[in-house]
Amino acid sequence: MTLPLSAYLDLESRVFVWAAGQGWQLQRTGPLRRGEWPLPRLEFLREGVLTPGEWDAALAACSLFMELVSSQREARSREGIGVKFYQAPSETLGFAQIAHTGPAEFVAVCRRLPGWDLAPAADEAAAFARVGLPCVPPSQRNPEVFTMLAGAPDD
């Protein structure tokens, strides 16, 4: 059974508040950022890198989650909604946001472009510029977009 979108958005807002209380800044990523529905889970990207133990402790202490997958930065909310956290160093945050927003086929093409993972790229615009592309909005990220962009390789 899929919960209504409002349940996901409510949980998302509570996760953002919790993260801010931890001193973290999270970004929405994954299918919801691309405007897709239904969702397999909520996904967030955190700037900075924590150890698996630090993630486990933070998620275990959070009252929003009833269970966690140890060392995987994954949890399940009390409503049964899966939540996945990704993390990236500040200097490559833009590449991580593209990679974790997806979809996989779009990211695979981007990863083959010269300049992928060439730091610094603190945001998506900088990461796209590193690979010679204009910033592509999440809802338009699909392999077909490369055939529309001059100078980009076809997949």
Image (cartoon, rainbow, N blue to C red):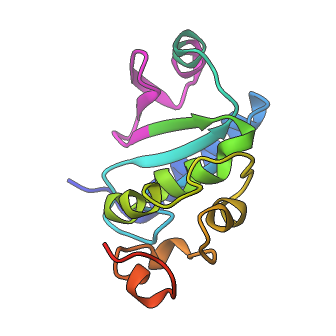
Picture residue at 66% right of the left edge, 61% below the top: 130
The quarter of the picture where residue 131 lies is: bottom right
Residue under the point 48% across and 51% down: 100
The percent coordinates of residue 31 (x first, y second) are 41, 61
For the residue pair 94 and 138, the one nearer the viewer reads as 94
Q: Position of residue 149 (x, y in %)?
A: 50, 86
Magenta highlight on residue 59: yes
Question: In the shown orientation, is residue 33 left or right of residue 130?
Answer: left
| Residue 144 seen by the camera | yes
The residue positioned 58% from the left and 43% from the top of the image is: 45
Q: Is residue 25 magenta?
A: no
Image quarter hosting the C terminus: bottom left
In the image, residue 132 above or below residue 69: below
Q: Which residues are magenta?
A: 57-83
Above or below, 68 relative to 118 = above
Q: Quadrant of residue 132?
A: bottom right
| Residue 74 image point, x, y percent | 42, 30
> Is 93 in front, or is 80?
93
Between residues 26 and 91, which one lies in front from this camera angle?
91
Closer to the camera, 58 or 125? 125
Place of residue 36 in the rendered image (x, y in percent of width and height, measured from the top left): 38, 69
Q: Is residue 28 left or right of residue 142?
A: right
Determine which quarter of the picture holds residue 58: top right
Position above or below: 89 against 100? above
* Viewer can see residue 25: no
